[in-house]
Each structure stands twice: as structure tokens, then as C-alpha cells.
Image: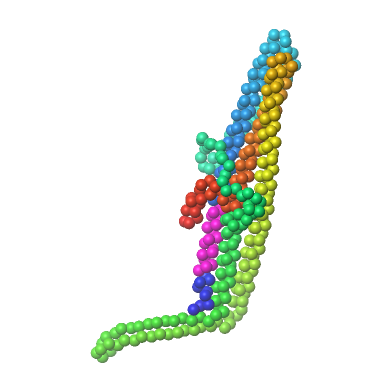
Amino acid sequence: YDGFSTAAFVKQQEAGLSATTQRLATTLENTALRSAQAYLEVLRRDQVVALAQVNLAQHDETLLKIEERFESGVGTKVDVVQTKGRRAQSKSSVLLSEKDAQNGRVEFYRVVGESPRELSLPVRPKGLPETLEQAVQLAFRNNPQVKAAQFDLEASQSARKQLLGGYHPRVDLALGATRNDDMDGSPGANDDETAVIKMSYNLYRGGADRAKMKEAIARINGAEQALIALRRSITQDVSILWNDLEDLSIRIEYLQLHVTSTEEVLAVYLEQLAIGKRTLLDVLDIQNELFRARSGLVSAEFQLRLAEYRLLATGGQFLGSMGLANQRAALTRR
């Protein structure tokens, strides 16, 4: 009997190991999230490039028609100059979007370690919380940082219990037995059995135990405050992410409406162009607006997907939603 110091020491070591494991899980979640962000950025930028190239092709087609009209004496030089200027701006957009796409691939290689190849559009992840309160509780329950802080607190509490064992008497039981024959020239067996109970009590060690106890209590208080601060921070992070999700969902509805209405206007403009009520420049203007509307919608959709991933990662569920929970468990067990 040692005042349960040994049992407390074992619990302290187990809690410390568990805290380290949860910190590794945090690293894995964050690494996976960065990889997903790089993945989404490659897809988003490639889609913007495709939209910009379509817009440039429309400018080229319109410029050719306006130049033909000018050469035939129907159009004006001003129309040609204006169209060339807009075509130059469209070409600049293509070059800029292509540069962004290249940078996105470089970032993907830096994060993932290999170049992106055939990437597919990600679907909406499973396991998203339905309410803000559910999201916060999910984070409190499953976030590996929170778990690590809880294990840190448990380890510091076990360390205090280990010190408390020093205030109890230590009792040791020693059993022994010897078996001898023909000892010291005397024939026959010479057997001994012993049983010793030893008790020791630490009465005074110059205040060292009290100082260690104060230090242990301070560590418990520090671990408690760290856990409280972490929960507050996670509550704030989850609330911000939840607001982002709601905002992006509403924005996407309006952006989609903008795209649809602009497509309808373009169809009307083309009909009016055929009967002479609209000019090619009018059509070009609405095509530019459609390009901007589609680009904005694409960006918002990818922002929404990334916000969903971040919310899952805050709840420690991102790898699980990607079907990688077993891989994380295997790595954290090593």
C-alpha cells in the first residue's frame, strides 16, 4: 500500500499519452483540411479559366462581325475600337485566371506532395450538424484539441493524487523462504520462512511536499483555464463558420437567380439583334455580365463547400466524412 500513488502515476501516464494522441489527431485533421482547400482551389480556378475562355471566344466572334460590318460600310470605326478594347480586357482576364490556376496547382503540390491530375467535383459532405447548438456540442465532444486539453487536466489531477499518496503511510509486505539440506555439517533439512511487514511514514521533508502540492494545484488550475479558453474559442469559431454557411447559402440563391435572369436577357437580346433592335455591342455587354455572374456563383459555391469542411474539422469529423476515419485511428494508435 502506497496511498494509491502508483495507480495515480499510471493514470497520469495514460492521460499524457492520450493527450499526445489527440494532438496528433488535430494535426491530421488540419493537414487533411489544407489538402481539401488546395483541391477545391484547383477546381475553382480551372472553372474560372473555362468561363474566361468562353467569354474571350465570344469577344473574338463579336469583333469579327463588327469588323465585317465596318468594312461593308454598315458599322462605325468607334464600334471596332470599343470592341477591341473590350476584347483586350477579356484576354487579360484569361491570362490572369490562367496564372491563378497555375498558382493553385503549385499550392496543391506544396500541400499534397504531388501534382493534381483528374479531379472530380466534391459532393456535399455527410454528417453536417443541423443547428448551431448541435455544431457547438459536436465540437465540444469530438474536437481533438478539446480532448487533448481534457486529458491534460486529467493528467494534472492524477499528478496531484500521486502526491497525496505521499501523505499516507507506506506499507510493504515481504515474504521469503529458503530450503537447505545438510547445512554446517548437520544432516537433515534446514528450512526457513519469513514474513515481514514494513511501514514507513514521511513526517517531515522540509516543506518539499507542500511546495510540490502547490505546484500541482497550480497546474490543475492552468489546465482548467486552458480548457475553458479553448471551449470559448471553439464556440466563437463554430459560430462564425455557421454564419458563413448561412450567408453563403443565401448568396448562392441570389447569384443563381442573377445567372438565370442574365441568361434570359441574353436570349432576348439575341432575338432583338436579329430584327435590328439591339447592336452587337449590346449583346457583348450582356455576355460580359453573364461571365461575371457565373464566376461569382462558382466562387461562392466553392466557398460554401470549404466552409462545410471547416465546420466538420472543428467538430473533429472531417476525416470521417471523407471516409478516412479508420486511417486516422490507425495512425493515432501507433
Query: x%, y% of residue 74?
Result: 72, 10
Q: How many marks?
A: 0
x and y percentages locating residue 201 in the rendered image: 53, 83
Could you say where residue 5 lies in the image, as x and y percent from the top left? Answer: 52, 74
Magenta span has 26? yes
Front-most of 309 and 190?
309
Q: Quadrant of residue 246?
A: top right
Q: Is residue 327 above or below residue 204?
A: above
Residue shown at the point (53%, 71%) measured from the top left: 8
When asked about the image quadrant of residue 68, the answer is: top right
Residue 234, placed above or below residue 51: below
Report whether 42 appears left or right of 329: right
Residue 77: image quadrant is top right
Residue drawn at (59%, 76%) of the image: 209
User: Which region shows up in magenta?
Assistant: 10-27
Looking at this rendering, what residue extends furthest in the top direction? Answer: 72
**In the rendered image, the vertical position of residue 31 relative to residue 45, given as above or below:** below
Percent position (x, y) of residue 115? 52, 37
Principal secondary structure, stretch drawn in magenta? helix
The residue lying at 64 percent from left, 20 percent from top is 60
Could you tell me if residue 30 is visible in this image? Answer: no
Q: Is residue 154 visible?
A: yes
